[in-house]
Every structure is written in C-alpha cells, then in structure tokens.
Amino acid sequence: MSFEFRPRPASVLVGLLAAGLMLTAAGCGHLLPLGPYAPAPAPPPSHLRSPLVLQAMNVQPPAPAGGCPARFTMISMPGNPGECVRPLDTPVTITSAAVSSVSSFQPRTPSGQAQGPPAYQIMITLPAADVTAATAVVTTAYDSQGAVDFSVAGRTWALPMVFRPFRSQQLSIALPSKNQALQLHRLLVSSG
C-alpha cells in the first residue's frame, strides 16, 4: 500500500498514509513503507465540519509560459505554486471520520537520514463504509498514472501521485507549516 510523490520544485509536501505508517517526501523522495507499525487507536468517527473530497486527477506540469494544456486547470496547494490537473472520475465526499490532532515529524530518507524541514500532519480514519469508495479513487489514479486530490472547503491541500494501488482506512494530509496544518484541522473538526 503506497502513495509516492513525484518531484515538484516548489513543493515541500510530506505525508504519512495507510494503516502501517509510511513516509513521504515530495520534491525529493517518495512514500515508503516503514514497517508493520500499529497506529494509535483512532477516536470514533464524527461528522466533519467541512467534508473531505477525494478525486483521482491527471497531473501535468505547467507550460513554460505558465499556462496549462487544453482541458486542464491550474490549482495551487500549500507549499506549491501550482499544478495543471484534469479530473479522472467522480469525486468521493467523506462527511464523517476520526481526525487526529496536528503532529509533526522529521522526514527521513530510506537510509534514515533527516531530509528537509519538519512536516505537520493530520491522520484521518475513514468509517469502514467509505473505504471502498476511497480505494476506487486511489485505483483510478494508479491506473491512469495520476494523483489523488485531497480537498477541504474548496481548496486542494495535497495532491500525491499514486505508484501502487492500496486499500486503507487511514489517510494522512501533511503540510509544510504548522499554521497550515492547524487551519486545515479547524476546517475538519468542529470546536467543542
């Protein structure tokens, strides 16, 4: 089970994904399984303040002049000035999930060396009923050599490339700054 990020010059996205912890470093690495680690038990799913939308996307680099190819649109993400994307399927909307607090970690290379600045992540545990739909999005992205758009409140927060199909109940959105991670957390979790 694995997501892998392709290099993106301005990107410092980093993430964890899947039931076993996996490490990703966008811009200079890829998501690799770290082993059969058991994640901490997740709280029970609750209604999300803003839904999480997953969608398989075809991704192309912007043209040298800054535009996108025909039928593609430019999206921006935290830590990345823009990517040209085209939807590959119908989006899947997740309205309830267990959402962890924001945590930080230091990305490492496969040899264990520190790689880049710390990243900030939010673990999202999907209800069992949503796993099949999320798996279909990941499979479509994989079959098309594309990416999965993680959007909340109309904004793309991550766009990881998929290099191996997988099925998982846990997803992670990782961001290059604590402020961005806290902002996303506030969008997902109702206060109180």
Image (cartoon, rainbow, N blue to C red):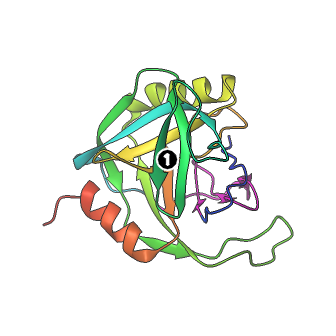
133 lies left or right of 68: left
Q: In this picture, is 146 found above or below 36?
A: above
| Residue with the mark numbered 1 | 170
Q: What element carries label 1?
A: strand
Which secondary structure is most common in the magenta stretch? loop
Which span of residues is magenta-colored? 13-40
Q: Residue at x 66, y 44 (%)?
A: 3
Q: Where is residue 88 in the image (x, y as percent from the top left)?
A: 52, 22
Please provide percent x and percent y for residue 163: 72, 37
The N terminus - image quarter: top right
Could you tell me which residue is drawn at 44 percent across and 25 percent down? Answer: 133
The answer to which quarter of the image holds residue 143 is top right
Mark 1 crowd level (few <14, some 14–19, many ≥20, 10 Å Cα): many
* Quadrant of the drawing holding the C terminus: bottom left
Q: Say if 21 sits above or below 150 in the image.
A: below
Is there any visible trace of residue 168 in the rendered image?
Answer: no
Residue 145 in magenta stretch: no
Horizontal placement of 37 versus 115: left or right?
A: left
Work out which residue is located at the far left of the displayed protein and give it.
192
Across and down, in percent, residue 100 comes to 38, 62
Examine the rendering and report whether any part of residue 91 can be seen.
yes
In this view, the residue in front, 20 or 151, is: 151
Label 1 sits on what residue type?
Gln
